[in-house]
């Protein structure tokens, strides 16, 4: 069976969770392959709303084995808060597996994240202050602590103590408050004991699943233009959300990846600092924010909004080798008299727009191709023609069933 990868094609918040939830029905495993609890995935099922940060979106299906792959950095307090919340709502999390090779986030990472950001002054990156960057930095420095380390409680406690003392030196040197080392050791010894039953060699397990012809779905957090290598550096995340990162973050080789789905909104959003060529700084931008409820799932921060940028999308297609696209949140544009789409930049980097008439019709209940207004279809056709990749799914509303199968 093919391995499907789902990748954000913009700066995140494209509605990946809804598409993953839709696709998960035909898979056996959903595997998160990078990032941490700095990204939120929201799934709406009837009157129920599920906001997920670490646990893969497929957990809502009882037949799915949700896996946190080796490329993820895991904040244990957040993980168990999420597990407890889901289980209180009758979502079984006992199936969850966590890679023994995942790196763990500790309070010193969060302290340093805040101190580094403060030190940048006006050049702040806009990090979520969750400790993600410092945790990946420790991984690269080869001093990180991994999930598999909790399987030896005494050694784990000693490692946490040594690392807390060492990081305290940097925290205080930067003007921060030293951590209570004994309190951190006690907290994470307890959390480590709770994590132990979930820990597996997920690389081996996933390959055994492939040998059985199981269908795997690999889920990225953030998006293409937040990629550490290919994003709008330095305003990027600390991992590789692109399709290539799916291989590294799961241990599954590239020859298994046969379906790579790029997710793009019908407009653009961005959280935090960094370039945004099509950003709207007027009442139209405010309108997109309010209609699209463009506030961060994790941070609550207001997202910056602008018109869809097909120059970016074409680049995302190249970087990820998308086999298809899902175009989400088309309904947010229902009340716009005209809709702009950036098709190219001029010599100065200024966007050049195609202007389309709006359809001025509520499409939030539409779930068939015939139900879409012709002007809405024209926008989808334009995107497909410009980027050269087929669009398979069009999102028409927040509900689980609010989508159209395009082809």
Image: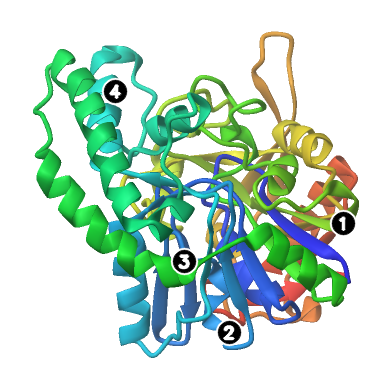
Residue at label 1? 256
Residue 303 percent across, percent down from the top left: 40, 43
Relative to 164, say whether 373 is above or below: below
For marks 1 and 4 on the same chain, the one whose residue lies earlier in the sequence: 4
Image quarter of residue 174: top left
The Cα–Cα distance between marks 1 and 2, rounded to whole angstroms, is 24 Å
Label 2 belongs to which residue? Answer: 61
Instruction: Kindly indicate the quadrant of the structure image that contains residue 290.
Output: bottom left
The quadrant of the picture occupied by the N terminus is: bottom right
Mark 2 is surrounded, within 10 Å at the Cα level, by few (under 14), some (14 to 19) or many (20 or more) other residues, namely some
Q: Which mark lies nearer to you, 1 or 4?
A: 1
Secondary element under disc 2, as helix, strand or loop, is: loop
- Which residue: 44% across, 56% down? 40
Alpha carbon separation for disc pair 1 and 4:
39 Å
Mark with earlier residue (4, 2): 2
Q: CA distance from mark 4 to mark 3?
A: 27 Å
């Amino acid at each position: 069976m093919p391995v499907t990868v789902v990748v954000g094609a913009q700066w995140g918040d494209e509605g990946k969770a809804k598409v993953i939830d839709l696709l998960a029905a035909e898979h056996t495993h959903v595997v998160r392959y990078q990032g941490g609890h700095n990204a939120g995935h929201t799934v709406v099922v009837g009157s129920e709303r599920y906001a997920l940060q670490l646990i893969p979106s497929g957990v809502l299906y009882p037949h799915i084995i949700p896996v946190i792959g080796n490329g993820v950095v895991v904040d244990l307090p957040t993980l168990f808060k999420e597990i407890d919340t889901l289980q209180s709502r009758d979502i079984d999390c006992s199936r969850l597996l966590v890679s023994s090779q995942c790196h763990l986030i500790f309070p010193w990472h969060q302290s340093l994240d805040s101190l580094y950001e403060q030190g940048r002054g006006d050049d702040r990156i806009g990090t979520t202050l969750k400790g993600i960057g410092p945790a990946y930095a420790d991984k690269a420095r080869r001093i990180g602590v991994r999930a598999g380390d909790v399987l030896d409680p005494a050694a784990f406690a000693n490692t946490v103590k040594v690392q807390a003392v060492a990081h305290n030196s940097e925290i205080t040197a930067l003007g921060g408050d030293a951590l209570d080392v004994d309190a951190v050791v006690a907290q994470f010894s307890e959390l480590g004991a709770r994590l132990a039953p979930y820990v597996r060699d997920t690389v081996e397990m996933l390959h055994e699943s492939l040998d059985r012809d199981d269908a795997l779905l690999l889920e990225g957090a953030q998006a293409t233009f937040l990629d550490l290598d290919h994003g709008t550096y330095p305003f990027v995340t600390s991992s590789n959300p692109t399709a290539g990162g799916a291989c590294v973050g799961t241990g599954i080789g590239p020859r298994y990846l046969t379906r790579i789905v790029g997710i793009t909104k019908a407009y653009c959003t961005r959280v935090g600092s960094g370039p945004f060529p099509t950003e709207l700084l007027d009442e139209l931008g405010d309108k997109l924010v309010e209609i699209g409820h463009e506030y961060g799932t994790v941070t609550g921060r207001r997202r910056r909004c602008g018109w869809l940028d097909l120059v970016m999308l074409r680049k995302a297609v190249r970087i990820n080798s998308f086999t298809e696209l899902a175009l989400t949140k088309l309904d947010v544009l229902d009340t716009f008299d005209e809709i702009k789409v950036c098709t190219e930049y001029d010599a100065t980097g200024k966007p050049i727009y195609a202007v389309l008439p709006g359809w001025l019709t509520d499409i939030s209940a539409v779930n068939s191709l015939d139900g879409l207004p012709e002007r809405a279809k024209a926008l989808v056709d334009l995107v497909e023609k410009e980027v050269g990749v087929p669009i398979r799914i069009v999102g028409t509303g927040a509900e689980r069933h609010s989508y159209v199968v395009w082809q």
